[in-house]
Every structure is written in C-alpha cells, then in structure tokens.
Image: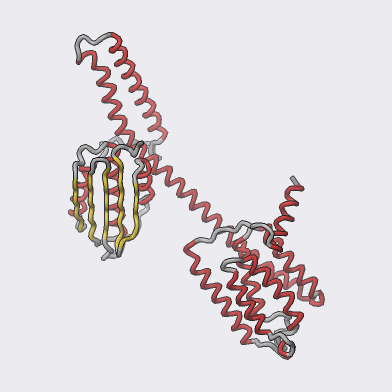
Amino acid sequence: MVFAEIRQFLVTGLATVFGVGRLERAPSPAPWHHVRVSFTVGAAVLVFILDLVNPPGRYGWDYPVNGWWFTAVAAATVLLTLVRPLWAWRVAVLLLTVTPQINWGWSDDWLWPWSPGLVLASLTVLLTVGQNYRQMVLVWVFAVTTGLVWLLFWGYLPYMLMICAIIGAPLVLGNAMRLRRVADADRAEQRTRADTLEERAVIARELHDVVAHHMSVLALRAGSARYRFTDVPPDLVTEFDEMQSTAREGLTEMRRLLGVLRNSDGVLDTAPQPRVEEIADLVERLRGAGVSISLQTDGDTVHVPDGVALSAYRIVQEALSNAVRHAPGSDVDVRITALAAELRLVVANSAATEPAAPADERPRHGLLGMKERVTALRGTFRAETEGNGFVVAVTLPLNGNEG
C-alpha cells in the first residue's frame, strides 16, 4: 500500500513537471466562466501596467535582450491559464529562472531579480493552478517552484522565507476555492437526487389510486362472476377465484408500497385524482383570479388512460403555476391536443408585465417534477424560453410507448 502511494506520488510529479500523462482537473462552474475570463484578461493588462510604472533600470536595459520581451511573455502566460494552467506554470517557472540571468536587476527601486509584472503573473498562474488541481499536484508545484528559486538564487537567503510564503499563499487560496466549488457541486447533486426521489414518490402515490381502482374493479368482477352468470363450469369458477385472489394480493402489496411512500407527516391524500377534462376548471379559476389565459382543446380527451390523464393535469397545473409565479401579468396560452396515439400539451406565456411576488417557503420542484412525469410515461419534454416568454411542450404516448 505504501509503495503504491509512493509510486502514485512520483507519477504525479512526472506528469506535473514534464507533462507526462493527463492530470484530472476540477470542473469550473459555467456561470463563473465570464468572470474568470475577465479576471485573467485584467491581470494580463495589469502585468504591463506594473512594468510601466516601474520600468527596467540600468541593469536590464544594457543587456542584449530587452526586458519588455519578458513582460510580454509573462502577460501571455497569464492568458494561457484559461486553457492550460499547468503549461502556464511551466512557462512561469522558466521565466522566474531565466529572467534574472539576463536582466538581473529590474530597477534601482524594486531591488528584486524579477519585474513587478512577472511577480503578478506568477501569482496569478499559481492561483489558477490551485483552483484546478488536487493537493498532490500542488505539492509538486510548490516544491519545484521554491526549489528552483533556492537553487539558483541561494544568495537571497534573507528573502527565501518570504518568497516561500508568497508562492504558497495563492496555492492554498486556490485549493480552498476548489474544495469549496467541489463541495457546492456535491451538495447540488445530492439536493437534485433528493428532489427527484421525492417527486417520484409523489408520482407513485398518485398513480397508486389509478392502478388500485382498476385492480379493485377486476377483483369485484372476478368475485361476482359466479353470481352474474348461470351454469358456470367449476373449472371456470376456480379460475375466477384465483383471479380475485391475485388481484387482492396485488392490492395488498400496493398498499404496503404506498405506506413506504407516505408523506413526511404520515398523512395520505385520498382525494380523487384529476383528469384532463378538469384542466378547464383550473383555467377558469385562474381566469377568475385575473390571469389572462386561453384554453384550446382538440380531440377526444375523455378516453385518455387514467395514468396519462393524471400526469397531464399535474403537468399543466405546474406549468401554469410557474407562469403565474414567475411571469405575473403575462398572457398564458394552453393547448391540448388528443390524437389516436398521443396527447400533446403546450403551455406558453409571454413576458411578465408586473414584478414577481416573493417566493414562499414551500418546496417546489417545478420543471424537475414535470420531467419526471414525462419520463415515467416515456414521452417527450421541452421547456425553454421562446421569444420574451417561456414555453412547456409535452407529448405523452397513450399506449405507454411500448414496442
């Protein structure tokens, strides 16, 4: 075990210093990408500004290689961190070791072997490396950077502790930012998973009533068959009895499952489950509340299967709730189309004309719940901005999309 860890440490070192192998990077959050780009470009510009404020002195200017070339490379190194942080670090280390050999005194006032711009560029590179790679890589980055500085500039021993602190600080800060980002991503993933499981439990509880109704009818019809028909053969009576027994066992198992999926307060909802036809009542209630809403229904919605009808009602209900809550004052259009093989739902709203009301404390899963219902029925789901408004478009197969 110890040898394996040592081997992994050495392999990581080779990959860090020489680029041998691929090192895993922590993913950057997409919403912060533009901020990172702006910060990096600003740091590259600041590299030039610092060297302009404190230009090369007599030492650097007398050598064949102009010090401004190193400033330009340092600024380019900062920009390189946007795509290749470790390669940017390698270039920065090369600049830190080569620059003092050619321009060993940047100015009379600065008194450091590196320009102010190069120092800023190196700190920016180290901060970016710390934000992108795990601790083992950062140990190698710190060791190689400080080791080369100690080896090449041992005459600056009074400054070495300060230099080590300056090198280590951005690495530690970047690593803390990376760990925070990873922890936030893990919490968001766990929250999404919990919301998904909760929404699936709600769907299961609602569909239980639909399935239980059909199984109850099956059990009743199988049990009463011997009384509804005359001259039923004994074998057929036995078959009906077995059908009734099987249906009752299925109902018992479903009730046990429903007990597992009960509400957090232990209370079960026993109200009748709504259907597609009741969407008209929902629209009327919203219209009475002052919402500008229209409803268009095409086709026969009466014979839509109960499970599909229930999900359709809940999807439209949630879509309308989102439209009213997030786009108050908008015009809402609901279109329901019942075809031979599928049910199509479209809920579209225009841009809001009034400020949105403050959110309440009720947990809402919104689009996640709609998507889970559509997925359970093997349908298609689309929810996106359209023009200045928002549209939810759903297709639910009436046959379960089997085959």
Which residue ends up furthest to the front in the rendered image? 403
- Residue 367 appears at what percent x and percent y? 36, 51
Quarter of the figure with residue 209: top left
Quarter of the figure with residue 161: bottom right
Q: Is residue 267 among what the camera can see? A: no
Q: Which residue lies at the image location 28% right of the left edge and 24% below the top edge?
A: 218
> Coloured how?
secondary structure
Q: Is residue 198 among what the camera can see? A: yes
- Residue 117 appears at what percent x and percent y? 64, 80
In this image, 31 relative to 114: left or right? left
Quick check: 202 above or below 170? Answer: above
So how many labels did they put on this image? 0
Q: Which residue lies at the image location 61% right of the left edge and 56% below the top edge?
A: 24
In this image, 246 relative to 67: left or right? left
From the image, which quarter does the C terminus lie in?
A: top left
From the image, which quarter does the N terminus lie in?
A: top right
386 or 359: nearer the viewer: 386
Quick check: 200 above or below 156? Answer: above
- Residue 369 appears at what percent x and percent y? 36, 47
Q: Which residue lies at the image location 67% right of the left edge and 72% below the top edge?
A: 92
40 or 72: nearer the viewer: 72
Q: Which residue lies at the image location 34% right of the left edge and 39% below the top edge?
A: 401
- Residue 315 appears at what percent x and percent y? 30, 47
